[in-house]
Image (cartoon, rainbow, N blue to C red):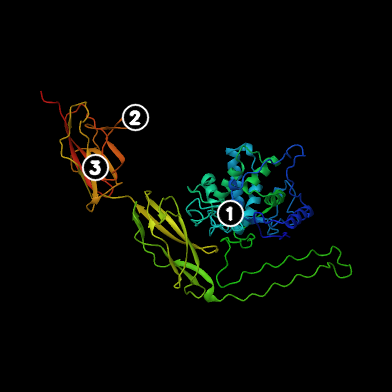
Amino acid sequence: MAAQFGRRLRRGATTTAVAAVAVAALSASQGPGAVLASGGGGGDQRTAGSAPSDDSAATGNSPYYTDLPPLVTPNKPGASTNLPITGSAESGIPASVLAAYKKAQQSIASSDAACRLPWQLLAAIGKVESGQARGGRVDANGTTFSPILGPVLNGQGFAMIKDTDNGAYDGDSTHDRAVGPMQFIPSTWATWGQDGNDDGRKDPNNIYDAALAAGHYLCAGSRDLALAADLDRAVLSYNHSNEYLRTVRSWFDYYKRGTHEVPDGTGVVPPPLDGGTDSSPDPGTSPSPTPPAKPDPDPDPSKPGGGSTEPKPPKPPATQPPKPSQTLAGMENAGTGVLTATAGDAFGERIKVRAKNSLGGPLAKVSVTFTIAGDTDARFDGGKSAVTLTTGSDGTVTAPVLQAGDTTGKFMVRAIATGRSLPAVVYTATVTARQADAIARTDDKALSAAPGAEFADAVEVKATYKGAIASGVAVTATMITDGDTPAENDKGPYFKDADGNTVRTLTELKTDADGTLRLPKIYADDTAGTYKLRLTTEGGATVVIELTVEAPAA
């Protein structure tokens, strides 16, 4: 039975009564309560020392869930081999979320063994911050189906933190919001973000990335989390609140006594956030109320009155079934064409998605978040990697213009109904290398050198595409043989690599902003004759330049 005494705590808004209830609930538990470090203790019970300042907290001291663990603990310490496979929903941790905590512990045990980070501490913080990624609503890679965003930190009931990421992580370019299952504010994520699932990205909405980042953050400053004082300092650095520390400590002690794995998506979903966007109900529907907990039965049913004398809980209010025309049933591609652009250019096609109701018709006023994912530097107009917009009367919404960066290859854009556990609409976009359809020398000087000497004049070429300057175009330079099928020549003029070795092919050359490329110095060997240098651009443009090696005239 979970103690549901308060949904969120705000800075400066916690009352003495709430704190008293928390302490009473902990003392009633069969497991140990949250024992905080104190100055009078011995051993590892040292004082937690001065807490970090508000603006240094990982979460920005944003609100958090205050539900306490069930009064009946799942097992005794050290009984991991006998943990139940089923049990209280509150004591279960979704499979991917639990795996992420344990993987983070193993990773930090290898990189910072002195920290002695227990995965149960990550589980406790994950429970308090997001209800274990909203009950384990994550995909196969550990990424939440929709971004978990805390309330806007605009100083109205919460901390005041102005935007630090131009909305890249939280979609808000005015103020910051805590992001992901471990609720990092963007500025903290920029410093502490990790790639916990080895996919080449640092995503605060990925439980593997977020758990590893939280572990590193908690271990900062040479902390030893096996010491109560250091553990308290670490938790307070995450959110500077004694009530927060007590709540995390209670879950930490609870998970240390045992837990069990539940399938992803079947964990307990926490109540809606005050101003957050991680659990918005479908438009036109009423969220199902959570029935109050049943009172404990009298231990002796034979007593007069038939057991407990507590009044029966009131019946939950009846809810009207949602209208099919107002219920969001899914999202679909609204006719987006092929997404291809040359590096540095804007995509000609814009991403468009449609929200459908249960009748298959359009649904207006649905919040949709477009997120760029993958190894790319492509961005939406304004330099954002994520934007949130609302569907119109026809149920569609179009993302801003997508701008390609310099990184070539494929990446994805995901469109999701913000705060809903619905499949994303995934679009594949491709960035191709800049091309040139013509390349030519910038002068017509004869290029010659004596045997064993270097060519006095540099080779300079200019690339164009449809008559315009072609900047940033890849060029390959090769000394070639004569004949119908030229190959790399093994004699005659050559280049030198960084170590001074002879090379006759150069790659990774690129034209500058003016479309111009000046080749490195060219050297002649001892073999006289006429040779050819071929330059080929991305796009297939080619120019062949003649090089002469001959002794100077007597």
Do the residues under discs 2 and 3 have CB atoms within 8 angstroms?
no
In this rendering, the label closer to the viewer, 2 or 1: 1
Number of labels in the image equals 3
Can you give x and y, in whole percent of width and height, for residue 377 in the image? 41, 50
Q: Position of residue 164 (x, y in %)?
A: 50, 50
Kindly identify which numbered label has been placed on residue 340. none
- The residue at the point 78 percent across, 70 percent down is 312
Q: Is 253 situated above or below 501?
A: below
In space, the residues marked 3 and 1 are separated at their CA atoms by 52 Å
Residue found 78% across the figure and 55% down from its top: 24
- The residue identified by callout 1 is 181
Find numbered disc 1 in the image and state the secondary structure of the residue it sits on.
loop
Q: Earlier in the sequence, mark 3 or mark 1?
A: 1
Q: Quadrant of residue 497?
A: top left
Seen at 55% across and 47% down, the residue is 188
Q: Which residue is mark 2?
A: 499
Crowd tier of the residue under label 1, counting other residues whose Cα lies within 10 Å: few below 14, some 14–19, many 20 or above:
many
Q: Is residue 197 visible?
A: no
Q: Where is residue 465 shown, x and y percent of the image?
A: 24, 51
Label 1 sits on what residue type? Pro
Q: Amino acid at mark 3?
A: Leu
Amino acid type at mark 2: Asp
* Tag shown at residue 535: 3
Secondary element type, mark 2: loop
> Which image quarter is the C terminus in?
top left
- Upstream in the sequence, badge 2 or badge 3? 2
Q: Give the Cα distance between marks 2 and 1.
A: 49 Å
Q: CA distance from mark 2 to mark 3?
A: 23 Å
Secondary-structure class at tag 3: strand
- Residue 466 at x, y = what percent? 23, 54
